[in-house]
Image (tube, rainbow, N blue to C red):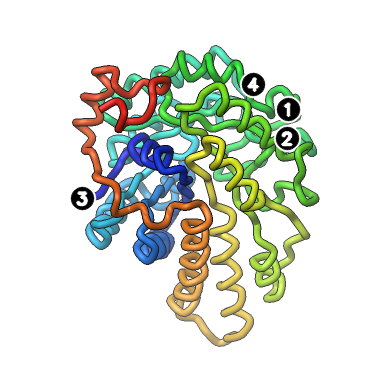
Amino acid sequence: MARITLRQLLDHAAERGYGVPAFNINNMEQGLAIMEAASACDAPVIMQASRGARAYTGDIMLARMIDALEEMYPQIPLCLHLDHGNEEATCASAIRYGFTSVMMDGSLRADAKTAADYDYNVDITRRVVEMAHWVGASVEGELGVLGSLEHGGGEQEDGHGAEGKLSRDQLLTDPDQAVDFVRATRVDALAIAMGTSHGAYKFTRQPDGEILAMRVIEEIHARLPNTHLVMHGSSSVPQPLQDVFNAFGGEMPQTWGVPVEEIVRGIRHGVRKVNIDTDCRLAMAGAFRKVAVQSKSEFDPRKFLKPAMDALRELCRDRFEQFGTAGNAGKIKVVPLPEMARRYRAGALDPQIGNMTEAA
């Protein structure tokens, strides 16, 4: 078994100065492509499932699929993470089905569309942390609301995303408040708001500091050097993937994502987890369209899915290498959940005192 907690994996990443892409999954083909890429370059893996993915796949099927991937690739440390948990029950049920890490997104209310106030966020995140740490699981929190600095709104993905206009203060995490939030909740990782958003249409132009506020990451890292930071909505929406999609019948308007060089800049300033979903969808969808156009008589799903897996595998391997994740899987000795729980209860994993190796 190579199931690892987010906390242990991100501690290792912090010690060695790399970041870890977190790929959203819904099905077997995605899981296989991600693990094949990880195995090819010896990279640890974060696979995350949203509430939408859990509803689509089913918790039992998802759990069995992850078990199978672990058995097929026992040398690859694998963190199964809940993306954008909306309430305590969602997080608890994920842990029950084998998730070693959960995100409690208290920036929004339980309806996953109404912006929450700070006290609500602290209270619910702290309760989830207490529950998860008791069994050794990790918790990611979010401070600030994910959304666009260009138009002041959020983007829905799998039923999650703020509705209505948001103020600039809501869309940018306050560094001083981040310090208070981490101390009050004891989260293992902190997702911050700095202009990224869900989906393909993140920016209408090449992003600069006005619409992609990387300075917020740097300011928070300066105040919380031992806290693992998370970039959400960080697909790069590469031009070649847009071109393939459109060349074979797609109608995607010109758009810009988060440049890889900006993500690498973030990694230098404490970003350890980078959420990527749109790029994966776009890579696979482009491959589907290509087969549909070039082989119009084809109706075997495998003939569509195999090229799509190839495209996803290539994308994942590229991100593992660009973020410095490659070459690190074999260097990690996985700590089981009961031992993680013991360390949490002993106070050895306080987010303010350093990484797990130092605290052990």
First reached walking from the N terminus: tag 1 or tag 2: 2
* Mark-to-mark CA distance, 3 and 1: 44 Å
Q: Position of residue 205 (x, y in %)?
A: 80, 51
Q: Nearer the viewer, residue 236 or 214?
A: 214
Disc 3 marks a residue whose amino acid type is Met
Secondary structure at badge 1 equals: loop
Secondary structure at badge 3 equals: loop
Q: Nearer the viewer, residue 304 or 328?
A: 328
Disc sitting over residue 1 in the figure: 3
First reached walking from the N terminus: tag 3 or tag 1: 3
Residue at image point 37% right, 49% down = 58
Q: Is residue 28 visible?
A: no
Mark 1, residue position: 166
Q: Is residue 232 left or right of residue 55?
A: right
Q: Are marks 1 and 2 in contact (CB under 8 Å)?
A: yes
* Mark-to-mark CA distance, 3 and 4: 39 Å
Residue at image point 39% right, 18% down = 127
Disc sitting over residue 153 in the figure: 2
* Mark-to-mark CA distance, 4 and 2: 18 Å
Q: Residues within 10 Å of mark 4 (few under 14, many from 20)?
A: some
Disc 4 marks a residue whose amino acid type is Asp
